[in-house]
Image (cartoon, grey):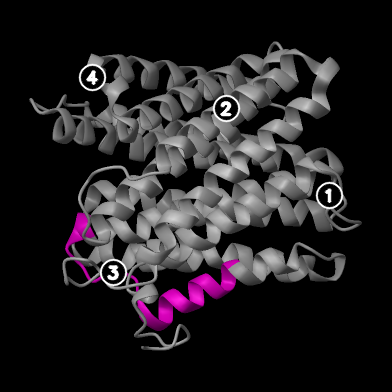
Amino acid sequence: MTSLLSPQHPVWAMAFRPLYILASLFGAAAIIAWGFGFHGHSALPGFFWHAHEMIWGYAGAVVVAFLLTAVATWTGQPPTRGALLMLITALWLLARLGALIPQGIWVTALSGSLFFWLAAADMARSVMVSRNRRNYIAVAALFLLGATHAAFHWQLFSDNAAALRPALWAGLVMVAGFIGLVGMRVIPFFTARRLGGDQVNTPPMVIVAALALPMVMAVGLIALPEAGWLLWAGVLCGASSLWQLCRWWRRDVVTEPLLWILYLGFACCALGLAAMGIGSHWPRFFSIGVHLISVGGIGLLTLGMMARTALGHTGRPMKLVAPLTLAFWLMAAATLLRMAAIVLPAAYNVWIYGSSLCFAAALLLYVYRYAPWLLTPRADGKAG
């Protein structure tokens, strides 16, 4: 069998293969480390390590994996694969290793930013060659996600403690923007494919706004951190997303785990953006918004999308396999427990332990079931 280190190995055929596995393993390890006492180090102290690694580490890997996989379908161009995919993956791994020790923070700053920018450049190649204009904004947003990472490290190296949190939130709302864009495109399509009937059309401007408004928030958080009014873009974005969710909704969604997890995660992300916007005026809502996005939106949507897209791209029936339904419920439980830590702080540590364990278990169940498929050729013999 071809060596795992060979560009011809099946794992390097498309971006979702290595990055879904690595993101899931890393996400499980990182959340357990944080939940049970690892609070960073002198160069990346306190909760900054945790937030940095979950936003640009775990979520960033899934975003890049999905976009580099999907753009091949969107444009008809060859996918990111082989040596280039190995380089992109290596940059992500270097960033994770560097973040573990104080002396490695420069490695994380450089390789982590290059990870997003190289992925964006390769995505741009496919989009520009095919003149796929509707995805120009996705390329720009991926560059901006890398820029939020670079901005965070610039503030870190400048000892500008007051600017670190806004830079983190900028990265978070960018991930929320990708969730909005992808959700707007795929949830009504998946719903129609799974349940039959016509697909509910979403106005193109609404789809663009799902990413554009978080981009405005992200730029505002970095360039004008005192301009809290910019966060009200999140209220508009959240309200628009919730309205679309109601338009797409069908009662049979609750019987299909591959659908309800996407609906629930999309709703959490929309509510989170709205809560962050409200939190610019009433601060008590801000933390609720951050964790609705980071655990509910990111946790549920990434797990649901990794499960759904990996089935199709490995040539397997579009039917959820055990124990993924359990994994979905565990991720939902992780969200509820994390919310409990905010509204019932007297038992904060108990809620955090429980949420961390549920989040990690959900991702490890995914790896257990999907890794054998991601590391081997497609079941139908096709390329990819």
- Of the residues under marks 4 and 1, which one precedes in the sequence? 1
Residue 204 in the image, given as x and y percentages of width and height: 23, 31
Q: Specify the farthest residue to the right.
A: 42
Q: Amino acid at mark 2?
A: Ala
Q: Residue at x 32, y 60 (%)?
A: 69
Name the front one of labels 3 and 2. Answer: 2
Note whether 88 is above or below 282 in the view shown.
below
- Extent of the magenta region: 73-92
Residue at the disc numbered 3: 79
- Of the residues under marks 1 and 3, which one precedes in the sequence? 1
Q: Specify the farthest residue to the left.
A: 197
Residue at the disc numbered 2: 333
- Secondary structure beneath dot 2 equals helix
Q: Is residue 81 magenta?
A: yes
Q: CA distance from mark 3 to mark 4?
A: 34 Å
- Of the residues under marks 3 and 4, which one precedes in the sequence? 3
- Secondary structure beneath dot 3 equals loop
Q: Residue at x 59, y 17 (%)?
A: 275
Q: Is residue 169 magenta?
A: no
Q: How many marks?
A: 4
Q: Is residue 254 left or right of residue 146?
A: left
Q: Residue at x 34, y 63 (%)?
A: 124
Q: CA distance from mark 1 to mark 3?
A: 38 Å
